[in-house]
Amino acid sequence: MKIELKNVSYLYNKGLPTEVKALENVSLEIQTHEFIGLIGHTGSGKSTLVQLLNGLLIPTEGDVIIDGVNSKIKEKRRDLRFKVGLVFQYPENQLFEETIAKDVAFGPKNMGLSEDEIEKRVKESMEMVGLNYEKYKDKSPFELSGGQQRRVAVAGIISMRPKVLVLDELTAGLDPRGREEIFNHIINLYNNDPELSIVLVSHSMEDVAKYVKRVIVMDNSRVFSDMGTYDTFSKKDLESIGLDIPQITKFMKKYKKAGHDVRDDIYTVKDAKEELLKYFGGKNE
């Protein structure tokens, strides 16, 4: 499934003294089975962009084409929202049912599916995020840890079988173990579904560097750059627009400046380890 944004602009409070231009002339495409990072400082247009991806917001100018359908066609928007699943920051705050199974079933019920299909999807979706159906189905979501609640919320979205999964600050507020666990499940989802695309919105340059293959950088309501992860961190001056770079990249740049003949175009711990082992004449065991 493909999403196309064609010369998209978006205004909040159009025509009022408080009018704000959140996006200006944005054009980009999301193809089948991409893993994309979306980064930018607060107010750069990221949140507006992701809400345009499934018709929650409609462009003030330009067009958003989702699986061949223009989001401006009002009667088609409901279907579009099943195709593009949005997991907002702290999604566990939106849990409300008395049991985990009922919460995960909420979306499929709204789709008008049969009871058998709903149960099947609930089981599969819970297992996909590492929650055993028999063990957890009758538990209250509020008995779980923060990381487990986050997984329930993700299961509720993937139970609708979206073709694009948008994750807005997925691991915000989680401890390192919780972050790693939920990312492991997301990577498994991506690897096991050749039609699924994922858009990861994050302030963590480490997460973006580690997981995504393409990075869209937003700045001042426009696309600053749109390229592969390596090129984004090695060729673009992200600090010039107020963005950070991965800590390991900072370390390698400082280490090279101190007189060590190492590559500084490195953005993952794994690559840094390999480079330093090579520099010191060791071997990666």
Image (cartoon, grey):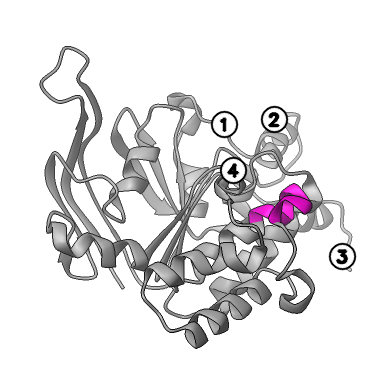
- Check if mark 2's residue and mark 1's residue have beta carbons within 8 Å: no
Q: For the point 27% across and 62% down, which residue is it?
A: 78
The C terminus appears in which quarter of the rendering?
A: bottom right
Residue 75 in the figure: left or right of residue 282: left
Q: For the point 65% across and 53% down, which residue is it?
A: 150
Return the disc, 4 or 2, that comes first in the chain's sequence: 4
Return the disc, 3 or 1, that comes first in the chain's sequence: 1
Q: CA distance from mark 3 to mark 1?
A: 31 Å
Identify the secondary structure beneath mark 1: loop
Q: Label 2 belongs to which residue?
A: 257
Identify the secondary structure beneath mark 3: loop
Q: CA distance from mark 4 to mark 2?
A: 46 Å
Where is residue 237? Give x, y as percent.
46, 33
Q: Amino acid at mark 3?
A: Lys
- Check if mark 3's residue and mark 2's residue have beta carbons within 8 Å: no
Q: Amino acid at mark 4?
A: Asn
Q: In the rendered structure, does residue 172 fall within the stretch colored magenta?
A: no
Q: CA distance from mark 1 to mark 4?
A: 28 Å
